[in-house]
């Protein structure tokens, strides 16, 4: 049997990436992890509502798909790095590929009130807490 | 051309400088792609969250330096619940070869990605030599 490699460098690059990912692991370091599923998400609270801020540099907004249901939000799409043909590459650090991530939050949100903004490579999702999920003040009668 | 990878978060590398900075933020190295076409050198840097107006590009003594300042006021009033990445300034510098026409450097910012076009000086462009 003959094994044919489409591009022998692919196998090498993949191995190198896997090794580098090991070495660069944030295990036992006191900083925000640089590992995990793409894209990285920061979740903030603003009053009763939740704001999710996601770093997606260089993603075309047409390639972004956002779905919401009860307390789950799904962000899927693809990050493309298009290099023109006939060039010589000196340095290649930007990653590309497809992503699909679902985030579940501890609150129920109002799916109709969700706002998404994409600006300067940052996706911000404004997730308003649904009225029926909000705590109620109970007066003692 | 490498095949599409399973997208993983790239760890943000922090700038290690001899001098300390006086800004109230961390400084990260933006991920860069550098490639060359027959007429120009392209430098593409990922700086998510940096506005076009807050990018500073300088060329001095053949050093191209790029700084992106983050507007931290956007995070005012937000209480972090769960975080996976740090935010801060971005800074990186490159040593230019003298082959670059330093007066014609162009810059474009789109979706947090800064693309710099560095045209080669006339004498550095490839030319075909005819055998007589």
Image: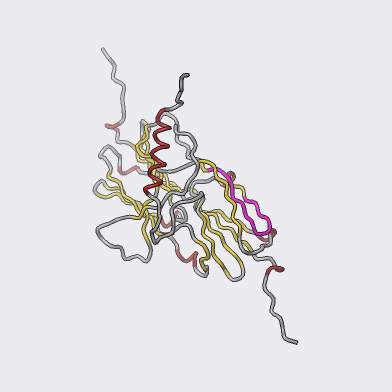
Which image quarter holds the N terminus of chain B?
Answer: top left
User: Image point 25% across, 60% down: which residue?
Assistant: B19
Q: Is residue A120 above or below residue A107?
A: above
Residue A131 in the image: x percent, y percent? 70, 68
Image-based side of B22 in relation to B85, left or right: left
Question: Residue A135 appears in which quarter of the rendering?
Answer: bottom right
User: Image point 42% across, 32% down: which residue?
Assistant: A11
Residue A125 in the image: x percent, y percent? 59, 58
Question: Residue B34 appears in which quarter of the rendering?
Answer: top left
Residue B120 lies in the magenta-colored region = no
Image-based side of B24 in relation to B75, left or right: left
Q: Is residue A96 above or below residue A111?
A: above
Image-based side of B129 in relation to B88, left or right: left
Q: A66 or A101, which is in the foreground? A: A101
Residue A61 in the image: x percent, y percent? 57, 47
Which image quarter holds the C terminus of chain B?
Answer: top left
Residue A76 lies in the magenta-colored region = yes
Q: A46 or B109, which is in the foreground? A: A46
- The residue positioned farthest toward the right in the image shown: A141
Q: Start and end of the magenta stretch?
A: A66-78
């Amino acid at each position: 049997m003959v094994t044919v490699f489409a591009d022998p460098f692919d196998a090498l690059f993949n191995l190198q990436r896997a090794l580098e990912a090991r070495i660069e692991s944030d295990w036992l370091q006191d900083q925000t992890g640089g590992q995990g599923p793409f894209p990285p998400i920061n979740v903030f609270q603003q009053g009763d509502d939740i704001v999710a801020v996601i770093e997606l540099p260089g993603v075309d907004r047409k390639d972004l798909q956002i779905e919401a249901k009860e307390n789950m939000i799904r962000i899927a799409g693809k990050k493309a790095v298009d290099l023109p043909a006939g060039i010589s590459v000196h340095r290649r650090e930007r990653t590309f590929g497809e992503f699909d991530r679902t985030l579940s939050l501890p609150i129920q949100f109002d799916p109709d009130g969700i706002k998404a903004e994409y600006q300067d490579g940052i996706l911000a999702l404004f997730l308003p807490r649904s009225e029926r999920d909000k705590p109620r003040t109970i007066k003692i009668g | 051309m490498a095949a599409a990878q399973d997208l993983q978060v790239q760890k943000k590398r922090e700038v290690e400088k001899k001098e300390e900075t006086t800004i109230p933020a961390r400084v990260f190295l933006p991920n860069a792609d550098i490639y060359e076409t027959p007429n120009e050198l392209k430098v593409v840097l990922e700086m998510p969250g940096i506005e076009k107006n807050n990018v500073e590009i300088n060329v001095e003594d053949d050093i191209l330096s790029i700084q992106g300042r983050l507007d931290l006021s956007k995070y005012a009033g937000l209480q972090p619940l769960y975080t996976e990445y740090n935010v801060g300034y971005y800074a990186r510098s490159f040593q230019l070869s003298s082959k670059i026409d330093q007066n014609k450097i162009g810059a474009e910012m789109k979706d947090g990605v800064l693309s710099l076009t560095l045209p080669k000086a006339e004498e550095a462009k490839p030319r075909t030599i005819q055998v007589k």
